[in-house]
């Protein structure tokens, strides 16, 4: 039985610039014929991955070109104490090992950065700490062989096999299991994601606004006429509809059938997806506004259902009317209409701080903790 967990969130942010394009302007998109504020799915996933860091290091992998430094720190101290393990030989062995990684003629290359002199890989590697530890152990075990001008086939295979980790349930982290990874040089290490995240869009039309700012030199002589720096910052204020869906069976599979880890990970993801905020220009705007409407649906053997079309016609709140409440009522109306047209076996749990009239949409709970607890019970039967 296929189980999907869908998250629908309405979050009204004060003036902000949470996710910028290449010109520094808030990202946007046309939807339903009008311009909408937008926060990219990549930005939201990044915020969730940063949230994972605060919860448990085992949930978090690193995407980096600086894996050489990590490996140097992880090599067994006994190996580092050997006479042959000079700093130069250590870098040489690690470089030789990394150069083994890849498929066919597509191998990872280690290059010296021209500015810093630091050794970096030519591609970003997205690896868990357990994978890096396993690679470090393989390098330590084959240290002297890796110093030779020609590395044997068996040693090269040992290095690449160290990243498989099929025997180790903790080898993959939650963020890789959820969001997947794509490594062009190592397609056999690619991971299909258990989670899909939509671009967040505003439920209403938006127009770009500009903040003109000036700054004065504090140490300037008494003549304070004129500004010493000036410029503009674009911003907007928007009520965003955010959506994500998790395939429970795929998450369990990606975590090598560790259902307990999958359940803890799902709880952490749902909590993080609700609470984590993009960090763009928050020092300038401090738009820390938690969601006022959260609906989590657990459904079986059915297709996922993004409810963005509830806002195809841009919401227009009347004077004195809450934009978030209007948006929540339209979302509930769309959800019920689709459920009537395309019935499916599902349960929905709702946090309704917007005090919207939901007309029977979902089971309203008093806190996010209650919503998440009920969701996990429904997932695990």
Image: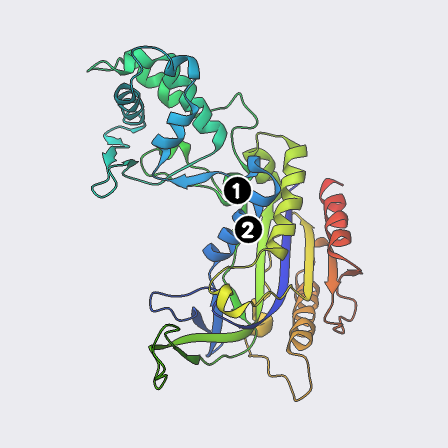
Which residue is the site of mark 1?
Answer: 175
Say few, some or many: other residues with alpha carbon within 10 Å of mark 1 (under 14 / 14 to 19 / 20 or more).
Answer: many
- Where in the figure is residue 38, as x and y percent of width and height? 48, 68
Give the residue at x 57% y 44%: 52
Q: Is residue 336 above or below residue 167?
A: below
Q: Which mark is residue 48?
A: 2
Give the residue at x 37% y 16%: 80
Quarter of the figure that contains the C terminus? top right
Of the pair 142 and 245, the residue shown nearer to us:
142
Q: Is residue 70 above or below residue 346?
A: above
Which residue is situated farthest in the bottom direction here?
319
Give the residue at x 77% y 49%: 374
Q: Is residue 246 above or below residue 351?
A: above
Say few, some or many: other residues with alpha carbon within 10 Å of mark 2 (under 14 / 14 to 19 / 20 or more).
Answer: many
- Which picture quadrant has residue 56? top right
Element carrying mark 1:
helix
């Amino acid at each position: 039985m296929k189980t999907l967990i869908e998250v629908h969130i309405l979050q009204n942010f004060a003036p902000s610039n949470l996710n910028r394009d290449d010109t520094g302007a808030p990202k946007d998109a046309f939807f339903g014929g009008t311009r909408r504020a937008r926060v990219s799915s990549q930005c939201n996933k990044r915020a969730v991955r940063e949230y994972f860091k605060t919860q448990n290091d085992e949930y978090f992998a690193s995407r980096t070109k600086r894996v050489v430094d990590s490996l140097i720190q992880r090599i067994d101290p006994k190996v580092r104490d050997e006479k042959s393990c000079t700093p130069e030989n250590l870098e040489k062995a690690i470089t030789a090992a990394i150069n083994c990684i890849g498929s066919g003629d597509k191998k990872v290359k280690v290059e010296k950065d021209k500015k810093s002199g630091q050794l970096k890989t030519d591609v970003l590697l997205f690896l868990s700490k357990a994978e890096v530890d396993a690679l470090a152990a393989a390098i330590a075990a084959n240290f002297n062989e890796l110093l030779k001008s020609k590395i044997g086939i068996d040693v090269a295979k040992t290095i690449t096999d160290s990243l498989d980790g099929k025997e180790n349930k903790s080898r993959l982290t939650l963020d890789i299991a959820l969001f997947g990874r794509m490594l062009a040089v190592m397609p056999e290490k690619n991971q299909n994601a258990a989670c899909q995240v939509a671009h967040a869009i505003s439920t209403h039309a938006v127009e770009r606004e500009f903040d003109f700012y000036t700054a004065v030199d504090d140490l300037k002589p008494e003549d304070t006429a004129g500004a010493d720096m000036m410029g503009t910052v674009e911003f907007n204020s928007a009520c965003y509809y955010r959506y994500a869906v998790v395939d429970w069976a795929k998450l369990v599979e990606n975590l090598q059938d560790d259902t307990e880890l999958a359940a803890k990970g799902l709880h952490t993801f749902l909590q993080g997806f609700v609470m984590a905020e993009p960090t763009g220009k928050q020092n300038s705007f401090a738009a820390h506004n938690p969601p006022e409407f959260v609906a989590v649906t657990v459904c079986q053997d059915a297709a996922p259902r993004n409810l963005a079309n509830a806002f195809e016609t841009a919401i227009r709140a009347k004077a004195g009317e809450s934009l978030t409440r209007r948006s929540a009522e339209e979302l509930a109306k769309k959800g019920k209409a689709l459920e009537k047209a395309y019935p499916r076996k599902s349960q929905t749990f709702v946090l309704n701080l917007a005090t919207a009239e939901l007309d029977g949409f979902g089971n309203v709970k008093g806190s996010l903790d209650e919503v998440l607890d009920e969701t996990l019970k429904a997932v695990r039967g």
